[in-house]
Image (tube, grey):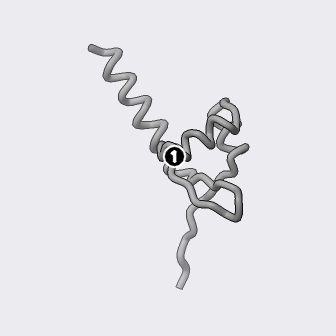
Amino acid sequence: MSSALPELMTVKEAADYLKVTPQYVRILCQEKVLEYIRVGTEYRIFRNQLLNSLQKAFSANTETAAK
C-alpha cells in the first residue's frame, strides 16, 4: 500500500519560482491565497496548489484582456 505524499516547497523555493520576495509568499499564505502547512515555525506550500493558483490567475487575466 503506497500513498503519494504531496510535493511541498519552502517559502524560499516558492518565492524563487514566483520571482517575488519570501515575505510576499508568507503574506499570501497568511491571507489564505496559497494553501500551506506549518512544519515547526516554517511554512510549506503545496506545489500543485501553487501551480493551480497561477493557472487560474493567468486564465482570469487572459479572459479580462480578451473583453
Q: Nearer the viewer, residue 59 or 24?
A: 24
Left or right for 4, reference 21: left
Please say if 14 is above or below 10. above
Residue at figure coordinates x 69%, y 51% from the top left: 10
**As drawn, which residue projects farthest toward the bottom?**
1
Identify the residue shown where x is 31% and y is 15%.
66
Which quarter shows the C terminus?
Answer: top left
Q: Residue at x 70, y 59 (%)?
A: 41
The extreme left residue here reads 67
Residue 57 in percent (x, y) is at 43, 32
Residue 14 locus on image (x, y percent): 65, 43
The answer to whether residue 39 is above or below residue 60 is below
State how many labels appear.
1
**Counting other residues with Cα less than 10 Å from the Cα at mark 1, is it few (<14), some (14-19), or many (20 or more)?**
some
Q: Hey, which quadrant is residue 26 in on the image?
A: top right
| Closer to the camera in the image, 34 or 31 | 31
Secondary structure found at label 1: loop
Q: Residue at x 68, y 46 (%)?
A: 11
Residue for badge 1: 34
Left or right of 38, for residue 50: left
Where is residue 2? Give x, y as percent: 55, 80
Left or right of 58 in this view: 12: right
Please name the amino acid that badge 1 sits on.
Leu
- Left or right: residue 52 compared with residue 6: left
